[in-house]
Amino acid sequence: MRLDRGEEVIETLKQFAKESKIKGCWFSGIGAVKSAELAYYNLKSKMYETKIIGKELEVVSLSGNIVWMNKNPIVHAHTVLSGREMETYGGHLMKAYVSATLEICLVSSGKKIMRTRDKITGLNLLEL
């Protein structure tokens, strides 16, 4: 799929999953964004620590999956982003807006995959 200028990555993927009735998939992508919110999951506090990078960035790598929880698609995405000076930022992608384009390849699992809350980590883990 291709995301265009101004589209928000996570919400667009959720909407695509609903409209396409995706049961579960893995994806990877490259492109560019004009700002991004990244996060690190602090296992001790069971909270995400976030950082907003408000500048144009190349998407060096985007990978993740889309599965379901409580009848809603859940996008779990990690990314590595690069700035003009070739510095990199990485982490869990919470939000990003496409600046030029974002090209994503999705591979369907063929069966419905769900997540459930894990009490120990506080994370929503895949049901296997």
Image (tube, rainbow, N blue to C red):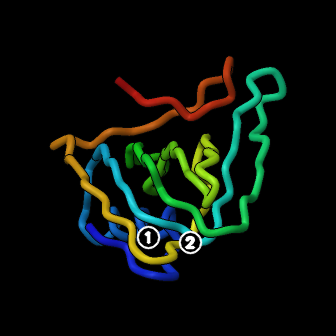
Instruction: Give the residue drawn at x 72%, y 67%.
Output: 54
Rendered image: mark on residue 85: none
| Residue type indicated by callout 1 | Thr
Residue 49: image x %, image y %? 79, 41
The label nearer to you, 1 versus 2, is 2
9 with respect to 101 (left or right): right
Asked whether 92 or 47 is in front, the reply is 92
- Please tell me whether mark 1 sits on a helix, a strand or a loop: helix
Instruction: Give the residue drawn at x 41%, y 63%.
Output: 31
Furthest residue toward left: 110
Residue 35: image x %, image y %? 64, 67
Lower sequence index among marks 1 and 2: 1
Residue 59: image x %, image y %? 47, 56
- Please tell me whether mark 2 sits on a helix, a strand or a loop: strand
Q: Residues within 10 Å of mark 1 (few under 14, many from 20)?
A: few
Rendered image: mark on residue 97: 2
Vertical side of 51 occupied by 16: above or below = below
Furthest residue toward right: 45
Vertical side of 41 occupied by 49: above or below = below
Furthest residue toward front: 85
Residue placed under numbered mark 1 in the picture: 12
Vertical side of 1 occupied by 45: above or below = above
Residue 91: image x %, image y %? 61, 40
How far separated are the C-alphas under marks 1 and 2?
10 Å
43 with respect to 33 (left or right): right
Instruction: Give the residue drawn at x 20%, y 47%.
Output: 108
| Residue type indicated by callout 2 | Tyr
Asked whether 119 or 30 is in front, the reply is 30
Instruction: Give the residue drawn at x 40%, y 28%.
Output: 127
Q: Residues within 10 Å of mark 2 (few under 14, many from 20)?
A: many
90 with respect to 31 (left or right): right
Vertical side of 57 occupied by 123: above or below = above
